[in-house]
Amino acid sequence: MAYDKFNILKSSCVPLPIENIDTDQIIPARFLKATERKGFGDNLFRDWRFNTDNSPKKDFVLNDEKFNGQILVGGKNFGSGSSREHAAWAIYDYGFRCVISSFFADIFRNNCLNIGVLPVKVSAEFLDKIFKAVYDDPKIEVTVNLPDQKVLIPKLNLSESFDINSYKKENMLNGYDDIDYLMNIKDNIIKFSKNTPL
């Protein structure tokens, strides 16, 4: 499999209520030398996380011990800018399995879906409710239910549905990338090829 299966994720959240976070902020261009997906998490939000002497910036959320979890909650227009897939790799490699926002750049959203990070688009109103819930209680659990396509805050009895392409949903549920999907239906492809005249 290309990555872990995604079914129902229950986790605390890391809040990053900044709008227009672009891919160069997610993973600066100087760290794009590698071609494998490993190691990019070390430099996720590098210039926001660290000073020039590599000491952690105390006021950045990833350096705040009270916030952790597998869900990153970002501001509107998350993943804008260049199309580098390394941004999605960095988010996955750091340990996030879901990013929630009220709007995603299309290419970034697709890059996430291709590597096992679920981008969940919610309304601006519901996003505000998530931010408030997390700041009120950093340990509050948020549930992302992919089969039912819902985001829930059980403690507050809040929920909202989200949309996802059916093909990408099936791949996420099975832990497939596009190649895995084709390999899974290899026998059907061979059968179709044999039974289809040129």
Image: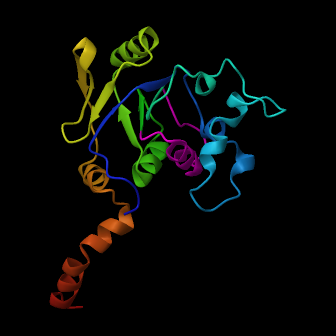
Image quarter (top left, top right, bottom left or bottom right) of the C terminus: bottom left
125 versus 56 height, above or below? above
Residue 95 left/right relative to 147: right
Residue 26 image offset from top left, x and y in percent: 61, 38
Q: Is residue 193 above or below residue 120?
A: below
Q: Which residues are magenta?
A: 76-97
- Residue 1: quarter of image: bottom left
Look at the image and name its color scheme: rainbow
Q: Residue lying farthest left? A: 195
Q: Position of residue 34 (x, y in %)?
A: 67, 59
The answer, for residue 75, to whether it is visible in the render is: no
**175 w.r.t. 61: above or below:** below
Residue at (40, 56) in percent of width and height: 3
Q: Residue furthest top?
A: 136
What number of labels is visible? 0
Residue 90 lies in quadrant: top right
Which residue is located at x 23 percent, y 49 percent? 166
Q: Quadrant of residue 87?
A: top right
Residue 106 image offset from top left, x and y in percent:
45, 42
- Residue 159, position in %: x, y? 24, 21
Q: Is residue 110 left or right of residue 197?
A: right
Please say whether residue 8 is visible from this viewpoint. Answer: yes
Residue at 36% in and 34% down: 120
* 185 falls in the magenta region: no
Q: Is residue 69 left or right of residue 37?
A: left
In this rendered view, identify the residue nearer to me: 77 or 52: 52
Q: Which residue is at a point 26% across and 78% down the rendered structure image?
A: 186
Q: Quick check: 133 above or below 78?
A: above
Nearer to the camera, 176 or 198: 176
